[in-house]
Image: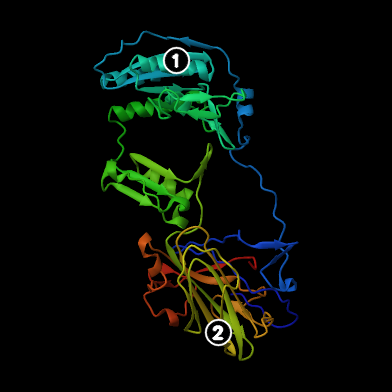
Amino acid sequence: MLERRGGNRSTLMHYILVAAIICILITTSAIGSMQLNGNYIISPSRDVSSYVRPQVLKQLEWEFPPGFEPGTFQDYIKHRPYSKAHFIAPYACEKRSKNSKVDVSVLVENSLYNSIEDNLLQYVHDLESMEYVASVELLAGGNPEEVKSWVRDQYNEGASGIFFIGDIPAAWAKVGDETFPCDLYYMDLDGLWVDSDEDGVYDVHESGNGDMGPELYVGRLFVSTLSWGSEAGLVNDYLDKVHRYRTGELVVPWRGLEYVDEDWYDMDVHLSDIYSKNVSRYDLGYHTTAQDYLKKLSLGQHFVQVCAHSFSGGHHFGTRPTEAVAYANVYVYSPSEREGFLFVGSDDGVKVWWNGENVITADVYGKGWSADEYKTLVHLKQGWNRLLCKVSQKGGKYLLSARLTDLSYQPFDDLTYQTSNPLVAGPEAPYIRSWLVNGFHQDVPENFYQYLTTNYLGVNESNVVPEEGEEMGGCVWTRVDNGYPY
């Protein structure tokens, strides 16, 4: 329980931003829309003397994967320079048959071959037992042009797919300001690829004499940059796992997992076209976490589609809720009876009760947060008053701010705020930054404008007097402390 009582008081604004939750979990969120004037956070036509100087943020640093930094083409070439390619046939493979279901050509890094030979041969035999036809060649050195010429030869002989194992040279492409490895270069055999400035990166991709799409598929098993095993060990583990799957020893349930983080919550993945009703979709914003994702994987999935910001070393899952409603409750102590203004800002819509009376309703969507956007006259009783805010959320930022002023628009300097039992309190800063929050996920995109009109608590919203840890509407009131006045 937190409070701030009399004495010398600053005139800091009474702000809180609530990054609301789905059910129990809570997170805080920084504002990305505030304006800076000098070193002060201000809003239009306000006296900056009542605003707090923001803390200086520590410079961001790259932390993962350890020992690595985001790679560039120059870094890649430095550690893996292109050279003349030497293709080696390790053994004679069965001649391709026009009646084979699929032709697969496997290209293996020469220096890796001896360490994986047994498992690789087993992989080829498993393919042949399923009436596939596979060929294997080794590559020493190499560059994208020669590797693509080899791929084209395989395609002309009937191959519909290529499997790279080990450090097979990667072609790099540039789109806009982004430069990246691009195996589409090997898949698109009739398109035009041009390195216009001869820096080793393909910056032009056109249809040429064909189109810009792939003529065959290319898979790549490249593990040398991983840190939890040797390269040969990881490749052998993978090939052994494939063998156990093909022979029925390793069984994967026939179901799919769509794990969709906040930025893609309204995107259709369509795994149901393959797995019918055997698809689990998770797009719950706050609840799409790394821990939950690993838990879902451990259940066994035949196919997983992850929609999240990622890089070569991992996935990033955000913490903002989507398609949700959150209630934020706080108690306000006034030493005297008086009138004042209540200012509220929200993203998206908001419904506000002051001492049980609905004083603000703004059922809106698609706008950003703005401080003091909504204003209403309120009566402060002597003693404890109750402020309840209900915030609707579609996607993106999820923000709420509230403050109280006198009739001259000056912040009160003698108010006390706390989240639970008003009879017990401790010191608190001169702005609202602690709330009891209760959130509900509402996974019906078309029902956004019913979020604020639907009662999720199961009791009269205007009369709720929640306690920390109390269950209401199937979810739990949980305390959130923002730690900042904005």
Q: Amino acid at mark 1?
A: Trp
How crowded is the residue under tag 2: few (<14 C-alpha within 10 Å), some, or many (20+)?
some
Q: Residue at x 56, y 74 (%)?
A: 344
Q: Quadrant of residue 172?
A: top right
Residue 215 visible, this angle: yes
Place of residue 291 in the rendered image (x, y in percent of width and height, measured from the top left): 46, 49
Place of residue 331 in the rendered image (x, y in percent of width and height, measured from the top left): 55, 79
Q: Quadrant of residue 431?
A: bottom right
How crowded is the residue under tag 1: few (<14 C-alpha within 10 Å), some, or many (20+)?
some
SS assignment at label 1: helix
Q: Residue at x 43, y 47 (%)?
A: 293
Place of residue 113 in the rendered image (x, y in percent of width and height, measured from the top left): 46, 16
Q: Which residue is mark 2?
A: 385
Where the N terminus falls, by quadrant? bottom right
In this rendering, the answer to whether 31 lies above or below 246 is: below
- For the rendered model, the colour scheme is rainbow
In this rendering, the answer to whether 314 lies above or below 23 is: above
**Left or right: where does residue 303 sit relative to residue 99?**
right
Q: How many dots with numbers?
A: 2
Q: Amino acid at mark 2?
A: Asn
Which residue occupies the extreme front position in the image?
209
Place of residue 126 in the rendered image (x, y in percent of width and height, measured from the top left): 31, 21
Q: Which residue is mark 1?
A: 150
User: In the drawing, what numbered circle is on residue 101?
Assistant: none
Residue 444 visible, this angle: no
